[in-house]
Image (cartoon, coloured by chain):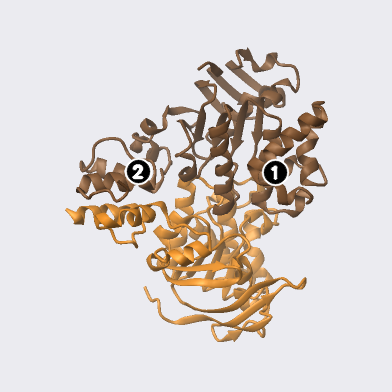
């Protein structure tokens, strides 16, 4: 697989702050991978996202060191707007991006704006509406629907543009558990059916862990840990020190490991954990 | 800690909004001094409407709420806010003064306490929430969300209500910030004997901190009992679209290995594992 994003010795300092928001970042992301980015609030996760879609340095004043290449080209080298077609971003507060009077118009607006023909617009609309289950809401004004529905509209509007890279910045932090799992259901299908590169910044790890191929921990402005998801969570102490609390199953096996009662990989899901416990206690698996 | 004296009685309460939306139906609850309760349920299930009825901001359409012997329909706002304080989900909806000190003093001044006592209460509230001295004269909007939330809680504490309801204290917070806020609320409960009610979607937090869970769905109380008990009622959880904490799910999925279904924290699970040996 080819490297779709290459970040090298990269630092960014906003003009009005003393210390860089992020520094000495080295990160390579392969096409088609699903990456989870985690870290405490204020660690620099959003700044990193802005650096990949060109909002930084485009829309902010500051000092840059190092390089951020997307598709082999440095972000500054793209014409205004052309990088945004390749990199779509969904934020935790979707209202900021709504402009239209109905959900359908909201989804179509961006497509008309890039001059697609009607047939192509219809094709993409049908695809995202089905994927995000928005059919019943198409005629509604975006400001009259619930927070979880708004977030699905925001995600659909970005997906309709078919960006090669999709970045979601805490897409579910303001949502209740049902709305949250619906967003992750869309992401799971996207991973299954498309070849987008997806980067999800999240605090809620329970939904993210089963989907992510790889996890990156950002702490105090730099990459503190970067590994495939299974190996990433083997570093339990490092994560806890950085203020990251892995989901219950991982924390349980990590505790057993610390007490010398378990060696081996930590299971990542409830099902995997229960299976492992049966093996350890010699109970025959009811699923077999 | 005393978890005995009845403090709030909710009797057959319905609440209908002026537009005709029925938000609460036949609510019956008893809340005692010193309890630590999680109020859970999907958005729109009636959690916030119930909370605003408990502190007298809304009055029941039918039925009654008796708080420390006072019927909420008869109590003045001044009487009610001294009994039950409600901290908004978004502290920005509550904070409006130009500096933190005045923000916290607003409530006590509003119920016309003498300035001497206002000062005493504000200082106490600042100490309890651990607001650094340098922030006293700062504008609340220049604080982090975690600190703004503390100011919001302090402004309620200064009214010295027995019951403190905190709406989604951990939303948008990272793991460490969430535990800090919850440890703080636990201290209010255990050391200062406040009844604390948290409204939350964060089930691991519920498992770790709440001793009692009230689960709501479609404006009704669907389950009410000790946390471990509510998290083992599969039918209620399904009806309310709630899931127990992941560690509880693990214990339940590995029931055939010998774990009991009501395990709530990683520590309990480790303990249970060791007891199997």
What residue is shown at x 60% (from left), y 65% (from top)? Answer: B45
* Residue indicated by mark 2: A272
Question: Seen from this angle, which residue lies furthest front?
Answer: A288
Q: Can you say whether A179 is above or below A107 in the image?
A: below
Relative to A277, A78 lies left or right: right
What residue is shown at x 48% (from left), y 51% (from top)? Answer: B178
The residues bearing labels 1 and 2 have C-alpha atoms spaced at a distance of 33 Å
* Residue indicated by mark 1: A153
Q: Circle 1: is it few (<14), some (14-19), or many (20+) Cα within 10 Å?
A: many
**Earlier sequence position, callout 1 versus callout 2:** 1
What residue is shown at x 35% (from left), y 43% (from top)? Answer: A272
Label 1 secondary element: helix
Is residue B139 in view from this perspective?
no
Q: Which numbered circle lies on residue A275?
A: none
Residue A220 is situated, as x and y percent measured from the top left of the image, at 49, 32
The chain drawn in orange is: B
Q: Can you say whether A282 is above or below B12 in the image?
A: above
Res A31 → quadrant: top right
């Amino acid at each position: 697989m080819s490297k779709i994003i290459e970040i090298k010795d990269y630092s960014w300092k906003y003009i009005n702050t003393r210390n860089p928001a992020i520094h000495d970042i080295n990160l390579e992301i392969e096409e088609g991978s699903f990456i989870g980015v985690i870290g405490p609030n204020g660690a620099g996760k959003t700044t990193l996202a802005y650096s990949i879609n060109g909002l930084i340095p485009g829309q902010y004043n500051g000092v840059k060191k190092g390089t951020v290449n997307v598709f082999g080209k440095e972000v500054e080298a793209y014409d205004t707007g052309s990088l945004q077609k390749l990199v779509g971003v969904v934020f935790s507060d979707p209202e900021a991006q709504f402009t239209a009077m109905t959900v359908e118009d909201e989804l179509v607006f961006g497509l008309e704006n890039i001059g697609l023909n009607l047939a192509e617009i219809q094709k993409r609309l049908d695809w995202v509406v089905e994927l995000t289950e928005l059919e019943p809401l198409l005629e509604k004004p975006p400001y009259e629907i619930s927070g979880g529905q708004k977030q699905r509209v925001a995600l659909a509007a970005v997906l309709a543009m078919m960006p090669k890279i999709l970045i979601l910045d805490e897409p579910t932090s303001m949502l209740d558990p049902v709305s949250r799992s619906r967003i992750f259901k869309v992401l799971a299908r996207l991973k299954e059916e498309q070849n987008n590169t997806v980067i999800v910044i999240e605090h809620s790890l329970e939904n993210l862990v089963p989907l992510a191929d790889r996890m990156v921990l950002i702490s105090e402005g730099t990459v503190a840990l970067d590994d495939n998801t299974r190996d990433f969570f083997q570093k339990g102490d490092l994560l806890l020190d950085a203020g990251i609390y892995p989901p219950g199953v991982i924390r349980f096996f990590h505790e057993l490991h610390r007490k010398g009662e378990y060696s081996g990989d930590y299971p990542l899901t409830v099902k995997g954990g229960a299976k492992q416990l049966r093996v350890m206690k010699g109970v025959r698996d009811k699923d077999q | 800690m005393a978890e005995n004296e009845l403090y709030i009685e909710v009797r057959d309460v319905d609440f209908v909004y002026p537009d005709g939306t029925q938000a609460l139906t036949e609510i019956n609850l008893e809340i005692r001094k010193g309890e630590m309760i999680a109020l859970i349920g999907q958005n729109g299930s009636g959690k916030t409407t119930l909370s605003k009825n408990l502190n007298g901001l809304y009055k029941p359409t039918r039925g009654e709420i008796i708080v420390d012997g006072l019927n909420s329909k008869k109590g003045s706002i001044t009487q009610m806010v001294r009994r039950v304080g409600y901290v908004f989900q978004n502290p920005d909806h509550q904070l409006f003064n130009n500096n933190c000190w005045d923000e916290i003093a607003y409530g006590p001044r509003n119920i016309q306490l003498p300035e001497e006592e206002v000062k005493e209460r504000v200082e106490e509230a600042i100490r309890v929430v651990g607001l650094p001295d340098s922030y006293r004269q700062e504008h609340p909007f220049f604080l982090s969300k975690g600190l703004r939330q503390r100011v919001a809680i302090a402004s309620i504490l200064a009214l010295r209500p027995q019951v403190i309801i905190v709406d989604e204290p951990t939303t948008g917070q990272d793991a460490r910030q969430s535990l800090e806020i919850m440890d703080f609320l636990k201290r209010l409960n255990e050391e200062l004997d406040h009844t604390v009610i948290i409204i939350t979607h964060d089930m691991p937090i519920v498992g770790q901190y709440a001793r009692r869970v009230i689960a709501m769905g479609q404006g009704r109380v669907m389950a009410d009992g000790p946390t471990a008990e509510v998290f083992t009622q599969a039918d209620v959880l399904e009806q309310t679209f709630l899931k127990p904490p992941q560690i509880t799910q693990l214990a339940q999925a590995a029931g055939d290995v010998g774990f009991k279904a009501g395990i709530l924290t990683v520590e309990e699970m480790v303990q249970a594992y060791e007891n199997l040996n």
